[in-house]
Amino acid sequence: MERSTWAALAAAPLLVLVSACGAADAASPAPPAAASLGADEVALRVTYTGGFVTPQSIPGRVPAVSIYGDGRVITEGPVAAIYPGPALPNLQQARISEADVDALVERAVAAGVGSGTDLGQPGVADASTTRFVVTTENGVKQTDAYALGMADVGGLLNPTQTAARKKLADLLASLQDLPATLGTAAVREEGGYQPKSVAAIATPYVKPEQPLELEQPVPVDWPGPTLPGAKLNPNLEVGCVTATGDQAQAVLAAAAKANAATPWASGGEQWSLLLRPVLPDESDCADLAKQG
């Protein structure tokens, strides 16, 4: 046998191994290096969609966790159990390293995000869906888990579906407590998130039936663009405007002295507002309208 034939046979196992590795890489989403993402690109996000909620609250929802390419982590902090509640959500910002961003993306992929695993449908009505989105080298991957973490009423889930859902529930818990997941020293708390823009989701104001011990709320002049703005849905009386620049700062200052029940005066009418800080990867009301 000629030398070239022996060399070809000797190389064959190596070629098979390389080919198999290539096939495995193509089959599973590879995590990105955080350095390859833009500062405002989402590496990993968890949001809640659907459920039995008011129409204006759907676009006004804030993601449970948003992790960006530059290591920023934006979450909704605790809110005091008072009525009326604050006018603005309590968004908090922290920062982690790019290496930890990559580690969390790997954790999400390992938990099944983007795998297409059958999660079943628990026997629960009107629950929200937990949506996991992760950016990998093979693109953006998404997994939706309906009624995640809720009891399986009726026993409709099989053991494989239950195990897959537990992986996602554990992932969510780990993302919501990054100091425990990554170590306290790995998470630098930076305080409240400071948005550059604020969206205002507007509906006509209806005077509430106040308890006798509470006074009727006093209208506040709206310092942003004229309300109600463009409709988010042509079938619903829900408008939206986006305040930017100096107007955004004026809105934030006014909102700090208001609450969720405050009527806002604009264009000779009064409006109820759901104020939603615009996140780094968002631009305006059009981005909020995409939320389900």
Image: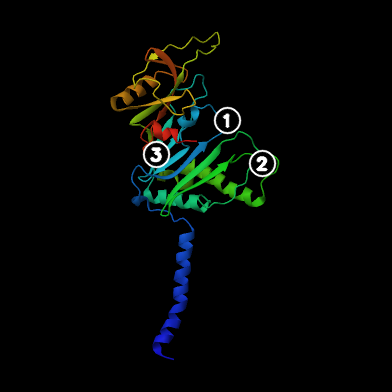
At label 3, the amino acid type is Ala
| Residue position marked by numbered label 2 in the rendering | 152
Classify mark 2: helix, strand or loop.
loop
Q: Could you give the CA–CA distance between mark 3 and mark 1, rounded to whole angstroms?
A: 31 Å
Q: Disc 3, disc 1: CB below 8 Å?
A: no
Q: Nearer the viewer, mark 2 or mark 3?
A: 2
Quadrant where the image shows the N terminus: bottom left
Q: Position of residue 288 (x, y in %)?
A: 43, 33
Q: Position of residue 289 (x, y in %)?
A: 44, 33
Classify mark 1: helix, strand or loop.
loop
Give the camera-side residue of 238 and 261. 238
Give the camera-side residue of 102 and 177. 102
Q: Nearer the viewer, mark 1 or mark 2?
A: 1
Farthest-out residue, front: 234
Q: Is residue 159 left or right of residue 224?
A: right
Chain-order first, disc 1 or disc 2: 1
Give the camera-side residue of 159 and 233. 233
At label 1, the amino acid type is Phe
Q: Could you give the CA–CA distance between mark 1 and mark 2, rounded to whole angstroms?
A: 18 Å
| Image: 15 above or below 24 | below
At label 2, the amino acid type is Asp
| Image: 101 above or below 241 | below
Q: Is residue 263 visible?
A: no
Classify mark 3: helix, strand or loop.
strand
Q: Position of residue 26 (x, y in %)?
A: 46, 60
| Residue position marked by numbered label 3 in the rendering | 94
Image point 31% across, 24% down: which residue? 247
Q: Is residue 152 visible?
A: yes
Type of colouring: rainbow
| Residue position marked by numbered label 1 in the rendering | 52
Image point 52% across, 24% down: which residue? 81
